Amino acid sequence: MTERSWGGTKLADRRAARRQTLLDVAERLAGEEGCAAVTVRSVCREARLTDRYFYESFTGRDDLLLAAFERVADEARSALEGAVATGGPQREVRARAAVSAFVALVLDAPHKGRLLLLEPFADPVLGARSHLLMPAFTDLVGGQLAGTGGRIDRRLAAHALVGGLANLFAGCCTARSTYRASDWRHTAWSWFSRRPRPHPGSNHPCHAAPSGVTVARRHHLNRTR
C-alpha cells in the first residue's frame, strides 16, 4: 500500500519533522531558561504546533525532555568517540582531540552544554538518566588510559576524570565564567593526559587523580605567577 502524501511530502516525513521541531524547542528552552521552562504548552507555543501533534510523538513533558537530553548526550559521545578514533596512537594527541571536540560543542552551542552538564542537578528526571549514561563516558575515558597503572587505578582515574571534567566544563557554561576557552582546554588537556599514579600496596580511592577544582586552581595560579 502506497503511503499517503500531502503536497508531495509523506505523512511519516511530516511527523518526523514535527518531532524534530519539538526536540529543538525543548533543547533550547531547557538549555537557555532551565528545565522548568519546558512544558507541553510552552513547547507547543514556541513550535507553533497544537498539543495533538505533541502527543503523536511524546507521552508527556518528561518524555520530551529526556529525548532532548539523550540527543545532546549522544552528540557529545559521538564527538568524543570520533575525536579519539582520529587522534592517532599518542595518548596526549587523543586527549587534545577529545577535549577540543567537547569544548567546541559547549562553546558553539552553550545551551547544549548547560542541558547536558547543569540541568541534571535541577531536574530529578534528567538526574536519574544522567546517572545511567555516565558509565558510557567513563568507559570511553578509561579506554584512553589503557597501559597506565593497574585496572583499579585506571577505573578510579576514569571516574575522577569524568566527574572532574563534567564540573570543569559546567563552569565553562555559566554566565559568571571569566576564563577564556583556551583556559578550559589547557586545564582539561593537562589533566586528561596525566598518567594515573600507581599506589603500592593500596587501592584506596584517596590516591586517585586530583579533583577538577584542584587542577583548575593550579592552572590559574601558574598563569598568574
Image (cartoon, rainbow, N blue to C red):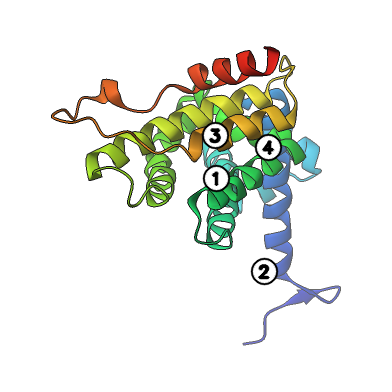
Reading the image, the residue beneath label 4 is 106
Compute the Cα span from label 4 to label 3.
19 Å
**Which amino acid type corresponds to the residue marked 1 in the rendered image?**
Ala
Pointers 3 and 2 in contact (C-beta within 8 Å): no
27 sits left or right of 119 in the view: right
**Of 107 and 199, the residue lying toward us:** 199
Of the image marks 1 and 2, the number of the one nearer the N terminus: 2
Q: Secondary structure at mark 2?
A: helix
Judge the density around disc 3: few (<14), some (14-19), many (≥20) Cα neighbours within 10 Å: some
Q: Can you name the residue that lies furthest to the front here?
A: 225
**Which amino acid type corresponds to the residue marked 2 in the rendered image?**
Ala
Compute the Cα span from label 1 to label 3.
24 Å
Residue 118, position as x, y percentages in the image: 57, 25
Of the image marks 4 and 2, the number of the one nearer the N terminus: 2
Reading the image, the residue beneath label 2 is 12
Reading the image, the residue beneath label 3 is 190
**208 over 189 or under it: above or below:** above
Of the image marks 3 and 2, the number of the one nearer the N terminus: 2
Residue 87: image tag: none
Q: Secondary structure at mark 1?
A: helix
Q: Quadrant of residue 51?
A: top right
**194 over 52 or under it: above or below:** above
- Residue found at x 74% / y 16%: 178
Of the image marks 1 and 3, the number of the one nearer the N terminus: 1
Q: Nearer the viewer, mark 1 or mark 4?
A: 4
- Residue found at x 72% / y 14%: 176
90 sits left or right of 156 in the view: right
Reading the image, the residue beneath label 1 is 73
